[in-house]
Image (cartoon, helix red, strand yellow):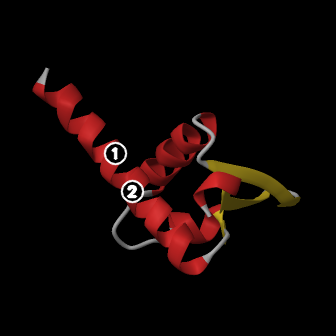
Amino acid sequence: MNILLNEMSEVSASEKRLLEVLREKGPQTLESLCALPDMSWSQVLLAVDHLSRSGEVAIELIAPCEYLVSLSGGNA
């Protein structure tokens, strides 16, 4: 049970960090978010997936295999 709680709080911290980056720097490519030094690419992908499903961020295909992540209208 503790492992699950730790994973949930880690995802929550990852989501908060991504939202913070997007608020400060504006839309970012998925590749640039995966290059953040304090997060692994798997943490970024999981957080972006959850945030996009909850409507907090939008993901847009901008080139083949290149995605732009931005805050949704209500979170900008």
Indicate left or right for 16 with 73 as reference. Answer: left
In front here: 45 or 51?
51
- Residue at 70 percent of width and 55 percent of height: 73
Residue 1 x/y as whole percent: 14, 20
Q: Amino acid at mark 1?
A: Ser
Question: Which element carries disc 2, helix, strand or loop?
Answer: helix
Residue 21 x/y as whole percent: 49, 71
Quarter of the image where one finds residue 64: bottom right
Q: Amino acid at mark 2?
A: Lys
Pointer 2: what residue?
Answer: 16
- Taking 72 as reference, is 32 above or below it? below
- Residue at 57 percent of width and 79 percent of height: 25
In front here: 66 or 55?
55
Q: Which mark identifies residue 12?
A: 1
Quarter of the image where one finds residue 52: top right
Residue 31 x/y as whole percent: 63, 66
